[in-house]
Image: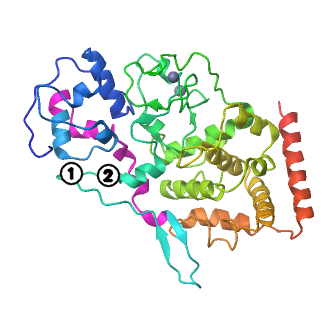
Amino acid sequence: MHTTTHSIAPLPVRVPPQPWEDLHSFLTRTAKQMHYERVNQVIQPEMSHFRIASSQVSLLAERADYRFLSDLLLLSEEALYQMTLHRFSAPFKHLEYFPVIKVPSWRSGLTEYLKPKIALHHDPIERPRLQRDLHRTFFLPNQTTQICPLCLQEEVAYDRLYWKARYLLTCHKHRLLLLRHCPHCSRRIPSQRLDPTSCPYCRHSYASTVTLRIAPEAMGLVSGDQLTLRALGVLPPLDHPSIPLELNDPRTLLPPQQYIALLRAFCISLHRLQPADVQSLLPNAFTAFLHTNQLFQRPYPDAVPPLQVAITHWIFSAWPDHFLAFLDVLACWSRKTKKKHAFDNFPHHFLLGDLAKDALAIVSHAYQQYQPTYSLQTLEHRIQEHLDACNTASSSSP
Ligand SMILES: [Zn+2]
Ligand SMILES: [Zn+2]
């Protein structure tokens, strides 16, 4: 029950929270410091009737839970809140950025948006909160995470809160692909690991075999992720485009919510392409990198396959050329399958909310340059030409 709080004596030994630490990680380090065998001994202590389910930790909302942890760990409500995913709630506040169905106005004009179920809280904290359903769309399942094995080699090994973002693929510091699964037993990486550096199921070290270094042809993933980290508030916003790495990416100066809405809309527009379609779009070296790192694996159990995020960043890395090539591949797919795609009758099927005006302007402007050629042969020829040009460019660069 969350209704009563008895004050509880603080733990005799505690650890200070680290920058951007995930509350799961913080509770785990606390348990380790206390020589507990399980993390739940912290949030479900024997000497109290008070219980916090570990499934609640990422989205902790009840005032009583905060009071309990404050007493136990001698931390303020603010410090605890900053370790939950609610910290990222700002760009997800207005749901009108995230349509799930768009019906053109000449038909009925009804657009439906992501709709979180109303969570029934007894006495929630008075701070902005991330809704449960949005959590599922934008963040990894509550009790799992992804990791950078090199970040975990640093003096204090702890999980970063932002690693839970589904749309994040790389560590911007070490330029590595983040790991979502143990490279030995393929199990998901749980948030609560008493030894953060090794797999609790098979005991192998996460760092032992994998080399996830980003190949030069995939560096667009790191700069794309830097924009994602800016949108989430992890990296400081760019007031003026002074950093050359992202200069060519038209998303650089978008407000956070519009950036996230655009990233989501592009990922959804890639949903139906098959691996063969994708290979006719991407240069060989980039495809090989994605294959080596198993980003082509299907079926991918996640709501947002990392492959779609990777392709989206690639599309924006040479704007609008890559986008125009993408439209060719979509048109080709559409003719072969006789199905409609996200850019048919643009912008009526593209799942970007009308509120994302700047983002829509970027795409509309490029779309106006697109010249569809309504013959499959010509289209295929143009796709091949683009691919040859990409491959030559990447093989001649140092
Ligand atoms: Zn790292
Ligand atoms: Zn394992």
Q: Is residue 243 visible?
A: no
* Res. 56 mark: none
Please name the residue shown 83% across and 38% down the image.
Answer: 394
| Quarter where residue 87 is shown | top left
321 and 239: which is toward the camera: 321
What amino acid does circle 2 point to?
Arg
Residue beneath disc 2? 129
**Which quadrant of the figure has residue 361?**
bottom right
Q: Earlier in the sequence, mark 2 or mark 1?
A: 1
- Helix, strand or loop status at disc 1: loop
Q: How is the image coloured?
A: rainbow
Query: Mark 1 near ligand 1 (CB under 8 Å)?
Result: no
Mark 2 Cβ and ligand 1 under 8 Å apart: no
Q: Residue at x 50, y 74 (%)?
A: 111
Marks 2 and 1: CB-CB under 8 Å?
yes
Q: How many C-alpha atoms fall within 10 Å of the one at disc 2: few (<14), some, or many (≥20)?
A: many
Q: Quadrant of the C terminus?
A: top right
Residue 37 location (% of width, % of height) = 29, 18
Residue extent of the magenta highlight: 70-97
* Residue visible at 70% across and 68% down in the picture: 340
Estimate the x, y position of residue 353 in percent, counting from the top left.
52, 67
Residue drawn where x is 50% and y is 23% of the image: 151
Say what amino acid the circle numbered 1 marks.
Pro
Which one is nearer the viewer's eye here, 172 or 131?
131
Q: Which residue is mark 1?
A: 124
- Report the quarter where the N terminus lies: top left
Marks 2 and 1, how far apart at CA: 9 Å
The quarter of the displayed image where residue 338 is located:
bottom right
Left or right of 282 in this view: 52: left
Dot 2 lies on which element? loop
